[in-house]
Structure formats: C-alpha cells, structure tokens
Amino acid sequence: MRPVISLLFAVLFALPAAAQEAPTLAFPLACSLGETCWVYQYPDTDPGPGWRDYRGGKMSYDGHDGTDIGVEDIDDIETGIPVLAAADGTVFRLRDGVPDRIVTDETREATSRIGCGNAVLLEHGGGWTTIYCHLKRGSVMVAEGDSVRTGDPLGFLGLSGLTEFPHLEFQVRKDNQVVDPNATGLWATDEIARAYGPVVLHVGFAKQAPEKTRIIAGDYEPAELTRDGGNFLFYVTVLGAAPGQTLSLAITGPDGRRLAGDEISVDRAQILRTNWIGLRDISGLDPGTYRATAVLTEGDGGESSRTADVTLLP
C-alpha cells in the first residue's frame, strides 16, 4: 500500500492510545503457508527512498505497510478462503462493495483512493489495531462493534482495491504507527519466518510469450494442447528471486529425450520473476505427454522445484 493510502487509514481509523501489551497474533488466513499460500511482500523497513524487508531482502517496495499473503492464482479465491481475526478484538471500521479486479494503468489512479479495497479494521486495546485489506466483494461477515475472537472469520480472500494479485494485506499498527510483526516477534508461531525465502510458484505451458498478469489469472494451465501451430513454451515464476540463485529449466518429450533447457543465473532481486524456454513450432512435435521441470537452487544449497505435464493431441 502506498504512503498516501497509509495516511488515509491514519485519518479514518485514528484511535486513542492506552497502555497495554501487544497482542499475540495468529496467522490471519485459512491456508497452508508454503503449500497453498505464500508471503509475497513484507513491510518496508527502510526509512529512506529505498526499501528492504525485515531480513534485509527486497521482498517489499518503498512505503509498503503490510504483510501480503497470496495464493497461486485467481481461481483459488473462488473456493472462498476465510480471512481470520489474528487476535481478540472489536470491529472498529469496515468497507465492502469494492469490485474484485486486477488494477491496470488505466484504473490505478481512481483505485488508489480505495487502495485497501474491502477491509476490516479490528481494535485490540491500548492503541493496537490490525487491518485486513483486499477482501472479496460481498464477503465481509462482521459488523462495526462486533466482538471477535482469535480465528473468527471476517470475510474471504479477494482481489479488491489496489492489487495486482489475489492476496490479503495484513497490517499491524500501534497508535496509528506501522509495526512489522515479522521483525517484532508478535506472531504466535514462527511459520512465517520459516516460510521466508524463494519458491518456484507457477509452472505451465503456453503457445505465446506469457504475461505475468495472465499467469496470475490462471490463463495458462492447459492439460492438453493442439499441434496447430504456434510456439511450445514452458514458463515459470519465482517468488523472491535474488542474486546468487540459479534457475534450471528443462523440457523432455514422450520418449524422455531433452528437447530444450536453460541455466539462468539470477542477477537482480525481484518479487515475482518470470522466465520461459521452448520451441518455435508446436506443429512439428510428436503427440504424447511432455514434461517440464523448474529447479531453483540457492547459494547455500537450498532448493525449490516444480514440474508440469501437458499432452499434445494427435
């Protein structure tokens, strides 16, 4: 969320301060971290014009206030993933009715006025608040003044407001000042800390150079392809790419023969990096099942990998 939106929240949701211990925070989304959801971005801890996350990495952007917990693609939010209260509290403010859509250059300026999208703000006493942004339109299931307990559902994960991928932006504030729960030990468990790091997130096949927004929209997930012309491409996205990593890509045919491959040295930090390899003419390939593999290796020996299969029809 950009600084102007942060200021709007400070004005709209100003609360009186009082002495009270910080709340212990439960994970605010009903998903399996590292398997069905991932942390895309963290609060910006750099006070200057640059940015860094709480570990000194680049999984943030300048002025970002929240911890962004996202799913793989838009199809995942259709099942209804509950957003959960991270601690006992009272519903202080909420908003619903903002449509779910990926922001574009044309809609960015107008959308920035409601950047948090559909949202719930909980007050926990002592000036502590938590904010839950980008909820699905029509999904908010609490009312102002309601008391909630840790783990109670507030709404569903969505794509409302100033967002380019389906996620929950979770903010923590003390006396309207941003607090990074990752850096201050507020989480009840260390699952977010253990999940930090790069991961091969999306893999799939396409007939044309894939666009990142369309990958997130789930547009390139065929189980079968026809051999009627076009490219034959295998794409991958890496969440949390950083220098020192190596991305190995390979496609093998029905007979196990390697048809294409590449070894890519990551040369810069990117929150979501996209690469692809492939062949120029799908019509010349034999029918059958093709397999592609992406392996991300870190300098310390850590590894993340995913495999995708597609069947070329006769």
Image (cartoon, rainbow, N blue to C red):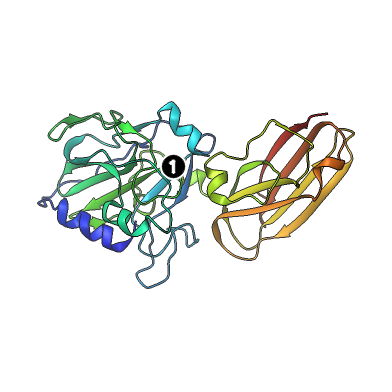
Can residue 234 be seen in this snapshot? yes
Q: 73 or 39, which lies in front?
A: 73
Assess disc 1: are there few (<14), some (14-19) or many (≥20) residues with their C-alpha within 10 Å of its C-alpha. Answer: many
Q: Residue at x 73, y 46 (%)?
A: 233
Q: Nearer the viewer, residue 290 or 120?
A: 290
Q: Quadrant of residue 179?
A: bottom left
Horizontally, residue 21 falls left or right of residue 255, namely left
Q: Could you tell whether 74 is left or right of 296 in the image?
A: left
Q: Is residue 197 visible?
A: no
Spot occupied by residue 194 in the image (x, y as percentages of width and height): 50, 44
Single out the residue that lies furthest toward the bottom.
48
- At horizontal 27% and vertical 51% (from top left) the residue drawn is 114
Q: Quadrant of the N terminus?
A: bottom left
Give the secondary structure at mark 1: loop
Identify the amino acid type marked 1.
Pro
Task: Looking at the picture, tell me which residue is in the foreground, 54 or 59.
Answer: 59
Task: Name the residue beneath numbered marker 1.
Answer: 166
Q: Position of residue 226 (x, y in %)?
A: 76, 34
Marker count (numbered): 1
Q: Quadrant of residue 69?
A: top left
Residue found 82% across the figure and 49% down from its top: 260
